[in-house]
Image (cartoon, helix red, strand yellow):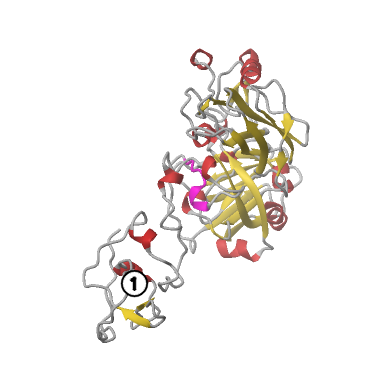
Amino acid sequence: MEDKETMPDALPAKPEPVKQPESPRISRRLWLSGAVTAATVMLVRQSVGKVAPVVPSAAPEVMTPATDLAAVDPTKVIGAGPSGYGTTSLFEKPERLTSLTSSRTPLQNLYGSITPSGLHFERHHGGIPVIDPDKYELLIHGMVDRPLVFSLADLKKFPSVTRTCFIECSGNYRSGKAEMTPQEICGLTSQSEWTGVLLSTIFKEVGVQPAATWFLAEGGDAAVMTRSIPVSKGWEDAMIVYAQNGEALRPEQGYPARLLLPGWEGNTSVKWLRRIKLSDAPFMTREETSKYTEKVKDGKIRQFSFVMDARSIITFPTYPVKVQKGWIEIRGLAWSGRGKIERVEVSVDGGQSWTAAELQGPVLDKAHTVFRYLWNWKGEETRIMSRAVDETGYVQPDYETLAAARESKGGYHFNPITKWLVKNNGEVFHDSPKSDDLS
């Protein structure tokens, strides 16, 4: 982006020329970013230990991370001062994280289990609405004793709760080719620290009637996204959240407030939440009749399959990484909508044997869990894979077993084991099901 800043009106008088050792040229942007006042100038130490001011040229060239910045000795130049809002290092290439698309989280490039807010996957049905938080209202009515309208400020007056959990799209599965990253295969899952008010607190405030068994959650986007939710989930652990990772929700994540249903398919955590209606039956909206239902065996259709089953994926080594012989730390993520991950098993011989991986604590409920496995690769071609087991005893299935049980090759709630082919030369590819298996 073009630099719109202007130079100070006045600079200190240029001192008499002093012979100095050769030093890297400093750009106008770098000079200004380190200024404390308009009179501040960069300093470089002379070889004799004295200090002399350096004034930038009138039209300095712009430095790039690959050349000029790399040549600057940071111990010889005053650095930048505090910024209004932190940014990543100039040496970190944005395309490293967003080379595919910002709508899928680059699982293979992240550290730890928390997804930066700006890299949370996106899924919306009618675009991202612009909602003034001062005009925001949430109506709660239907089978309640006291129908009420809450402003954002009203919601923030209630006791706040913070929890860490994942959100995953129910259609989080892609396959079909060898050149696929974890981001492309199942990047529609992200994890954040969410802050808001428990829905059970709001239910008590409005007086939800005992006969109410379902509630309608309605969004304020152009699609007016709506889902029917069992009231029991509202009492259990549902939240109305207004903050993500320590700051206000991003617009694409439901600003100024959204519903959060930990462990359930992402579409039920309705964004831009504007209305909740209590009832004694589901509302049978478009999003739960023509959408978000999946075929199962014997031609049947499964509806209201809210919970996301246990899943895992290796995030290193994966395509397009090339590894060397020797010790390799296999890393990945595992999660389950039914609770905590009990263990993750890793196979480095194509599924002939399985060994428990190390889980990074704390292992949280309905949350991404990092796992690691140390592997001594001797250069042979093999397949590596992982499978998750949650605290209910559910074991993540392989593709063949899942496809046979569902009589389906993919679709919603499809969570097969992901295999990676490690070739003799160290190249790693997605071991995708054969094309005829996907037809």
Quick check: 141 above or below 74? above
The residue tagged 1 is 31
Where's residue 101, x and y in %?
A: 42, 40
Secondary element type, mark 1: helix
Quadrant assignment for the N terminus: bottom left
Q: Is residue 14 left or right of residue 405?
A: left
Predominant SS of the magenta segment: loop
Where's residue 147, x and y in %?
A: 64, 55
Where's residue 118, x and y in %?
A: 48, 51
Residue 146, visible in the rendered structure: no
Q: Quadrant of residue 305?
A: top right
Q: Is residue 329 left or right of residue 249?
A: right
The amino acid beneath tag 1 is: Trp
Q: Nearer the viewer, residue 352 or 21?
A: 21
The residue furthest front is 48
Where's residue 378, x and y in %?
A: 61, 28
Q: Nearer the viewer, residue 124 or 147?
A: 124
Q: Which residues are magenta?
A: 117-124
Q: Nearer the viewer, residue 429 or 215?
A: 429
Residue at figure coordinates x 40%, y 79% from the top left? 36
Residue 204, visible in the rendered structure: yes
Q: Nearer the viewer, residue 250 or 104?
A: 104
Residue 12: say if magenta: no
Residue at figure coordinates x 52%, y 31% from the top left? 185
Quick check: 266 above or below 18? above
